[in-house]
Image: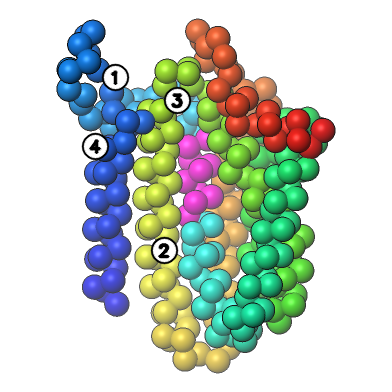
């Protein structure tokens, strides 16, 4: 068990090194006018962008906490459904299709009306509210059919979260800073996801006594932790201003490139 934990952590660190060294988004602009001038790593520059403004930092923390919640739930859910609710492969495919169908419908027809009705921050809060309820409702399900109903009803707001938060974080920095911020947030999100996978995997084995405990309620504390992480993310989202500040000197809204097609599609 501990060997797999060590391997996961090492892989996560290698991902961080790769993001900061190989990706153009996380590298500093070349100095001078020469195209041959080497680029330098810029993790410090990326972090300075994230912490220079309280709104940007809170959006980053929202992304981190939600990544922890989503990854933890994903780690726990598969063995729970199979081991305790008797989910078969065929039923699992149907469950996945129901969730994907609900998510596709939400992306195609739900993002636009939601953003127009309550704004970007309000839409983010709605999606995070679904993230709070989802683990708790799953804990109350006693058969795969009930899980399918929950996944269908909440699939849309869960899938809408990513484009909405992407549009928000893109609108908070200037166009020339987009790549650096996106790369830094990708690193942070990947690190949070990998860490959550390891922690929840170890906790699942512990609370279920390596899967031998016949009582499914032994897993309920993990669902509760996922919900608490989502609730913390929601509270941070509630602290965001309804009208997000635009960066000075920004002539175009890059975040609009993310959300506008979805908004018009739902019109």
Measure how far apart labels 2 and 4 are at the Cα level: 24 Å
Colour logic: rainbow
Region in magenta: 59-68
Query: Tag 3, which secondary structure?
Result: helix
User: Does 64 lie within the magenta span?
Assistant: yes
Q: Earlier in the sequence, mark 3 or mark 2?
A: 3
The structure residue drawn at horizontal position 23% and vertical position 8%, both measured from the top left corner, is 33
Q: Which residue lies under the disc numbered 4?
A: 21
Q: Estimate how packed mark 3 is, as few (under 14), some (14 to 19) or many (20 or more) residues with alpha carbons within 10 Å.
A: some
Please tell me which residue lies in front, 168 or 99.
99
Query: Tag 4, which secondary structure?
Result: helix
Measure how far apart labels 4 and 3 are at the Cα level: 17 Å
Q: Earlier in the sequence, mark 1 or mark 4?
A: 4
| Residue 229 point in image, percent of width and height | 54, 54
Q: Which residue lies under the disc numbered 1?
A: 29
- The circle drawn on residue 197 is 2
Are discs 2 and 4 less than 8 Å apart at CB?
Answer: no
Measure how far apart labels 3 and 2 are at the Cα level: 28 Å
Q: Earlier in the sequence, mark 2 or mark 1?
A: 1
Q: Earlier in the sequence, mark 2 or mark 4?
A: 4
Q: Which residue lies under the disc numbered 3?
A: 178
Query: Tag 2, which secondary structure?
Result: helix
Say whether residue 10 is visible. Answer: yes
| Residue 111 point in image, percent of width and height | 73, 39
The C terminus is located in which quarter?
top right
């Amino acid at each position: 068990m501990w060997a797999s934990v060590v391997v996961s952590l090492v892989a996560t660190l290698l991902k961080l090194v790769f993001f900061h060294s190989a990706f153009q988004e996380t590298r500093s602009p070349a100095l001078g006018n020469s195209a041959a001038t080497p680029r330098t790593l810029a993790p410090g520059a990326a972090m300075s962008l994230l912490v220079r403004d309280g709104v940007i930092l809170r959006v980053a923390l929202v992304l981190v906490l939600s990544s922890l919640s989503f990854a933890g739930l994903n780690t726990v859910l598969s063995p729970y459904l199979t081991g305790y609710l008797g989910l078969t492969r065929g039923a699992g495919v149907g469950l996945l299709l129901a969730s994907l169908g609900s998510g596709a419908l939400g992306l195609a027809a739900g993002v636009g009306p939601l953003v127009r009705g309550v704004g970007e921050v309000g839409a983010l809060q709605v999606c995070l509210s679904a993230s709070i309820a989802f683990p708790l409702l799953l804990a109350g399900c006693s058969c795969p059919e009930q899980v399918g109903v929950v996944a269908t009803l909440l699939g849309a707001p869960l899938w809408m979260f990513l484009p909405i938060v992407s549009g928000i974080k893109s609108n908070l920095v200037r166009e020339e800073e987009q790549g650096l911020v996106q790369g830094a947030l990708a690193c942070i999100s990947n690190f949070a996801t990998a860490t959550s996978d390891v922690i929840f995997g170890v906790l699942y084995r512990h609370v279920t006594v390596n899967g031998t405990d016949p009582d499914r309620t032994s897993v309920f504390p993990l669902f509760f932790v996922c919900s608490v992480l989502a609730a913390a993310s929601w509270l941070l989202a509630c602290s965001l201003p309804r009208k997000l500040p635009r960066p000075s000197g920004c002539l175009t809204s890059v975040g609009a490139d993310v959300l506008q097609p979805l908004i018009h599609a739902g019109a």
